[in-house]
Image: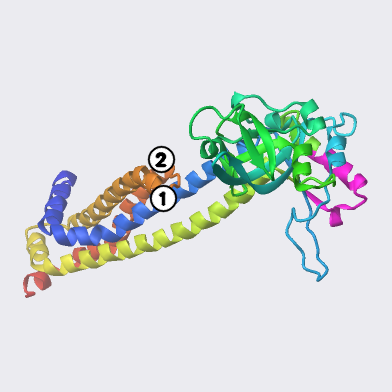
Amino acid sequence: MNWVETVRAGVEAVRAHRMRSILTMLGIVIGIASVILTVGFGQGAQDEVRDEINALGSNLLIVSPGSSTDSGGIRGGFGSATTLTLQDAAAIADDETVPDAERVAATTTSSSAVTAGENNWTTSVVGTTTSWLEVRSRTLSSGRFFTRDEVDAGADVVVLGPDTASELFTFGSPVGQTVTIGGRQLTVIGVLESSGASSTGSSEDDQAVLPISTAKSLTGSSSSSVSTIYVEATSADTLSAAYQEINNLLLVRHDVTSADSDYSIATQDSLVETANSTNRTLTVLLTGIAAISLLVGGVGVMNIMLVSVTERVREIGLRKALGATPSVIGRQFLVEASMLGLAGGIAGVLIGVVGSWVLPSVIDQPVTLSLLATVAALATSLLLGVGFGVYPASRAARLTPIDALRSE
C-alpha cells in the first residue's frame, strides 16, 4: 500500500466514526484556539501599551516626586510627596545644566467639577506651561493653546479635552464659551485632538488644561510644588544623556544621594518594559493552561486510537495474512492519528481567527493575530497526532496474524 492509498484509508476510517472523531479532536481544538487567542491578547496588550506610552510624547522623560511618610510612619507610594518644584523645572530647562533637554513642562493635577450652563462634568484639571502641547505630542482640533503671557498673568482660559468638551457642550463649538471650575469662570480657547490613549489609568481625552498659575489660584495654593515634570530630550539618541543630566542636577538641588533620592525618573523604554513584563507573565500563564488542554487532547487521540486498534483486530489480522507488512499497518494507524490532530488544529485555528475578529468588539480589548503563533499551533497539533499515535500504531503493527484472526 503506497502513501496515497494509506491516506485514503485513513480518511475513510476517520469518516466512518464522525462523532467519535469530533469528540476526540475537541481537546486539541480548544487548546489550539486558546493558544492563538492567548498570544493574540498578549500581543494586542503590548501593542496597546506601546501606543499609549508613545502618545505621551516623543523622547519623553517623566520626573515624579518620591514617596511621603506620615506621622504614623506610613509611607505613601511614589508621587505622594511634594518634592518637585517650578524651580526644578526651570533648572532642567536651562541649556547650561541640561543641554540635552529640548522642552520642559511642569504640571499639577487635580480633579474638579466643570460646569457649562446646565451641564456639569467631573474631570482631571491639569495646570501646566506653554510647552505642554509639544512635550506631550498633542494637537488642537480647534482654537489655540494659551501663551506665556497668559501663564504669567494667571489668565482665566482653559483648553478642553475632546471628551470633556462633548460632555459639556452638546451643540456648537466650545471655543469662546465659558465654563466654571472651582467657582471661577474660564473662557474656552481651544479643544484638543483625540489622542486615543490613556496613560496611568486616566483618559487623555477627558481633561481640562489651564495655565499652571491659574490652576494654583483655583486651589488657593501659594506653593511652587508640582506633581510631574515632563522633559522632551533633543532626540532619541540623547535620551540617556538627558536622563543622567537631570538626575545629577536634582541630586545636587535636593541635596540627596542616589540611595535616598526623593524623586524618580521614568523613560518610555522603562514604562514599556514594565508593562510588557506583566503582559508576558500573564501570557505565559494562559499559554500554560492552553498547553494542558492540548496535552489532554493528545491523550484523547491516543486512547481513541487504542480503541480503534482493539475494534479492528480481525481486520489487521486479515490484512497481515494477505501480505501487509507491520510497517504498512503501523503507517495506516499513524496517518489516522495525524489526521485527527491536524483536523483538530485546523478547526482550532479557524475558531482562533474568528475569535480574534469578534472578541475585540465584545470585550473592548485588542487581539493581534500572530502568524507565527498560528503556524506553530497548527504544526503542534500535527505533532500531537503523530506523537500520541505512535504507541497505538506500534501496537497494531506488533499483532501476529494468528492471534488477530482468532480473536473475538
Residue 349 seen by the camera: yes
For the residue pair 368 and 97, the one nearer the viewer reads as 97
Residue 292 painted magenta:
no
Looking at the image, do the residues carrying marks 1 and 2 touch, with CB atoms under 8 Å apart? no
Q: Amino acid at mark 1?
A: Ile
Looking at this view, name the residue that lies furthest to the front: 118
State the image coordinates of residue 229 (x, y, percent, origin top left): 77, 41
Q: Which residues are magenta?
A: 243-264
In this view, the residue farthest toward the top is 143
- Residue depicted at x 31% and y 44%: 354
**Residue drawn where x is 17% and y is 62% of the image:** 20
Relative placement, left or right, of 297 versus 167 is left
Element type at marker 1? helix
Q: Residue at x 6, y 63 (%)?
A: 318
Dot in front, 1 or 2: 1
Query: Which quarter shows the C terminus?
Result: bottom left
**In the displayed structure, would residue 76 be above or below residue 52?**
below
SS at circle 2: helix
To which residue does mark 1 refer? 363
Number of numbered discs overlaid on the protein picture: 2
Instruction: Give amino acid for label 2.
Output: Leu
